[in-house]
Image (spheres, rainbow, N blue to C red):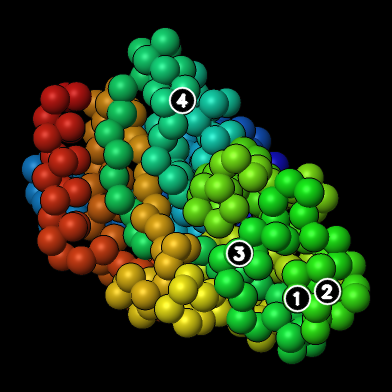
Amino acid sequence: MAPSHFDGLTRRNAIKAIGGAGAFAVAGCTETEGNGNGDGTSGGNGNGSGENDMSGGSESESLSGAINIAGSSTVFPLMSAVAEEYSEENPDVSVDISSTGSGGGFSNYFCVGETDFNNASRPIKGEEQDLCSENDVEYIELIAATDALTVVINNDNDFATEMTIDELAQIWQEGAAETWSDVRDEWPDEEIERYGAADTSGTFDYFVENVQGAEAGHTDDYQATEQDNTIAQGVEGSEYAIGYFGFAYWYQNQDQITPVAIDNGNGPVEPSLETAASGEYQPLSRPLFTYPSMSSLAKDHVADFARYFVSQTDNEQIVAEEVGYVPATQDVKEEQMQKLEDAIEEAQ
């Protein structure tokens, strides 16, 4: 996967542009060719902290080295935005970020020792923990932000703007409804066109668990992809399409597609930063994570970047305004920073 090029764009448009590319590489604010498998280069830069400085400000001597990150397409735009900021002050640290899906990142890269971080839109699974253990990969779990997993429809769809969880389940479970009228009699007798996350995605796992349930499974009758902009474009292009992905991707395509208000039994609630933060948007509000490996935290430039990332998790301008997620609270950030500092001290 080749990295995206966005020189001259605003960061918000750059994030939108790279959302479908699957890989992001930055080194001193310039692109370095990466191979998309977690071992390419991209630069991070920022005001990463000096050791044991929990403020996230860089007081260290010049750092250099490569950082390889794979995993969640949902966390991808947030990690990319933070890496861009970091690269401005640390031009000799290269950060390569690939969008492989949470599960794809754990199984193919992180738990076999190929990457320094794995981004995830759900907690690491038992079998992934076992794989990491088999390969002597130790790690810690850090909270990155809160997401409002968003169901989207075409702008010309004026009938399915509100749905219950049961109706969503009918559309996405194994043996799914074939037409919209199969879900509600008054809806059009038109075939449902589905776009959604691939089964290597943490978003796929979360949707199955919290909408239709594991026993009901997930239909194979849909366009599966790890590239969330592909979902947005597919829904935009068909009046009877539906899709789901992280809130940030709707946030970057607000004029092109329509979010569905979800009724979990207390009336329809639209996805937003406010309803995700308040807990009203259920059951599709979820925490997002990144997992640095302990062996990588033993390296000064990786530890510095990790500190910087955590320091930015409550940055409303980056997390909320530019990317489209709910920032961490001050208390959560401080807890995560202490957890990280303890791990760095143990690793080094």
Which residue type does callout 4 highlight? Answer: Glu
Q: Marks 3 and 1: CB-CB under 8 Å? A: no
Residue 268 vs residue 226, the one in the foreground: 268
Residue at the spot x=86%, y=67% of the render? 179
Upstream in sequence: badge 3 or badge 1: 3
Name above or below for residue 181 compared with residue 66: below
Q: Please identify the residue farthest to the left as the structure is shown.
A: 52
Real-space Cα separation, disc 4 to disc 3, in angstroms: 30 Å
Residue 289, given in percent of the width and then of the height, sits at 37, 48
**Element type at mark 3:** helix
Which residue type does callout 2 highlight? Answer: Ser
Residue 176 showing in the rendered view = yes
Residue at the spot x=36%, y=80% of the render? 274
Upstream in sequence: badge 4 or badge 3: 4
Q: Residues within 10 Å of mark 1 (few under 14, many from 20)?
A: few
Q: Residues within 10 Å of mark 4 (few under 14, many from 20)?
A: some
Real-space Cα separation, disc 2 to disc 3, in angstroms: 15 Å
Q: Marks 1 and 4: CB-CB under 8 Å? A: no
Residue 144 vs residue 79, the one in the foreground: 144
Real-space Cα separation, disc 1 to disc 2, in angstroms: 5 Å
Residue underneath mark 3: 166
Residue at the spot x=60%, y=64% of the render? 166
Residue underneath mark 2: 181
Residue underneath mark 1: 184
Which residue type does callout 3 highlight? Answer: Asp
**Element type at mark 1:** loop
Q: Marks 1 and 2: CB-CB under 8 Å? A: yes
Residue 32, given in percent of the width and then of the height, sits at 58, 45
